[in-house]
Amino acid sequence: QVQLVESGGGLVQAGGSLRLSCAASGRAFSGFAVGWFRQAPGEERGFVAAVSRGGTNSDYADSVKGRFTISRDNARNTVYLQMNSLKSEDTAVYYCAADLRASFVSLRTVEIDYWGQGTQVTVSS
């Protein structure tokens, strides 16, 4: 079992920045591909970013490329999402995800093993 707890969400003006964190407990964190997804009101949950087990490779949704950066610290069992140049369309609940079998490339398509409870990000225009 893995427990994922997100933090760092909040209200920010358009053009601002936020840094989300996801702390993991339970099984060895370095064995999981991890990533972030988001769900806006009335929409399905969608992929945002993923990072490889060693933290050297990453994958992003086209809508956030160049603005968001995902990273992980396996020593601290934590994954981060640095969000810059935020737009109103980034408003959503952001979820941390971890999967034992997926790669950082396939995380966007597989059925995820573990989810966090979500953290709200609201960008005001």
Image: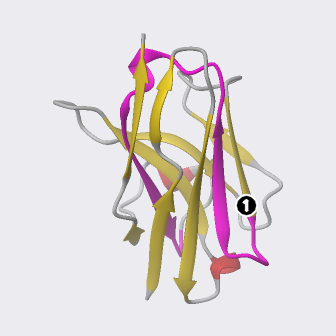
Residue displayed at 49% across by 16% down: 87
Residue 95 is one of the magenta-drawn residues: yes
Question: Circle 1 is placed at which residue position?
Answer: 72
Q: Give the amino acid at mark 1.
A: Arg
Using a 10 Å C-alpha cutoff, classify the residue at mark 1 as few (fewer than 14 neighbours), some (14 to 19) or many (20 or more).
many
x and y percentages locating residue 16 in the rendered image: 61, 22
Label 1, secondary structure: give it. strand
Between 75 and 102, the one lying in front of the other is 75
Judge left or right: residue 57 versus residue 6: right
Residue 45 is one of the magenta-drawn residues: no
Judge left or right: residue 105 versus residue 114: right
Between 48 and 84, the one lying in front of the other is 84
Residue displayed at 40% across by 18% down: 89
- The residue stretch that appears in magenta: 73-101
Between 112 and 25, the one lying in front of the other is 25
Residue displayed at 60% across by 15% down: 15
Residue displayed at 71% across by 46% down: 58
